[in-house]
Amino acid sequence: MEEKLVLTQEWDKTFPQNDKVDHSKVTFHNRYGITLAADLYKPKNADGRLPAIAVCGPFGAVKEQASGLYAQTMAERGFLTIAFDPSFTGESGGTPRYMASPDINTEDFQAAVDYLSLREDVDPEKIGIIGICGWGGMALNAAALDTRIKATVASTMYDMTRVNAKGYFDAEDSEEARYEKKKALNAQRILDYKNGTYALGGGVAEEVPDDAPFFVKDYHAYYKTKRGYHARSLNSNGGWNVTGCMSFLNQPILQYSNEIRSAVLIMHGEKAHSCYFSRDAYANMMNGNPNPDNKELLIIPDAVHTDLYDRTDVIPFGRLAEFFHKYM
């Protein structure tokens, strides 16, 4: 039985409502018994079974931010879509709050496919997924595992296992650096257990010094301003638990990405600090892949990381629609 969630009924998104799309709130549950909250978008006056897309991300965001914008925009282009909050975050269930898991969060995508497959207005043979930022890596992981997924888009992706284990730009890729991280995280576990609460790691900083790296300013410009701030967003507020991503240190998620047979489009901004994740993920996916012809890496000129969160003049939604219509 699904947990009863309290869902807000007001339009509280960071983007305007589209009058060409119907919107409603839905819930579904994953294999671990966690109930997930989602916004469902459907083209007005649509008939019959539609191709469907489940959208999630960025990592630390909520469905009222970038994933909802993607979902609503793709619905305008003829798809039934859902944007969902991952387990332990936003309006979704799961306790303790603000935890992440490479297993459970991959399962969240698969649970979305379960839900969509049983809707009478969805063609179960035409289901795809979109993962943004950290959920781009999760989407690729789900595509490697779930043969029901016909097409996958990873947008401005992070491989969260890589960045946790090796640091940004692989600058902490050593046994010693990983040992010190593990040592600090395990010390925090003792404190959390003693205190009976989980300490938060902090979201995007309230103020950014002039000499901060550009990507820090980039995140601040989205999560801490009217452009992208949301009260339920971890990145906009207190962040994940300090120990929330501990398991990512030890569990690479893209081990068998080169066995993905279904269609994959990986897209990233040329000037994004994170572009190396997509370039490397694409190269690894193509290494000996039995179905290379339906894979593509799309590099968007001059775009930075958060441009692919909400810049409708930069995100190639027309290209995405063509991709999904072709392969689903």
Image (cartoon, grey):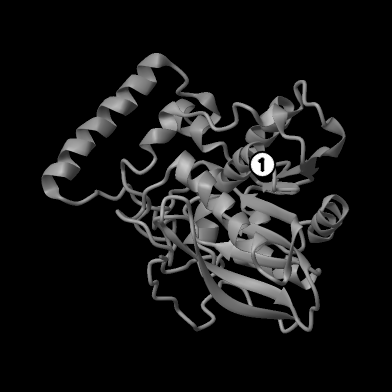
Q: Is residue 58 visible?
A: no
Helix, strand, or loop for circle 1?
Answer: helix
Judge whether 88 appears above or below 148 on screen.
below
Q: Please name the residue that numbered disc 1 is placed on.
A: 143
Q: Residue 85, how many percent across, how many down?
A: 50, 61
Task: Please tell me whether residue 240 is drawn above or below residue 246 in the rendered image.
Answer: below
Q: What residue type is disc 1 on?
A: Ala
Q: Residue furthest toward the top?
A: 175
Q: Position of residue 189 (x, y in %)?
A: 22, 37
Picture quarter containing residue 127?
bottom right
* Residue 239 visible in the current orientation: yes
- Left or right of 225: which side holds 178? left
Position of residue 32 in the picture relative to residue 81 (left or right): left
Image mark count = 1
Can you say whether 261 is above or below 327 in the image?
above
> Residue 146: where, in percent of width, then height?
64, 42
At x 31%, y 23%, the residue is: 180
Q: What residue is drawn where x is 63% and y is 58%?
A: 55
Q: Residue at x 82, y 31 (%)?
A: 291
Residue at position x 79%, y 78% in the image: 46
Given residues 316 and 195, the one toward you in this image is: 195
Rendering coords of residue 210 (x, y %) = 47, 48
Front in this rendered view, residue 16 or 210: 16
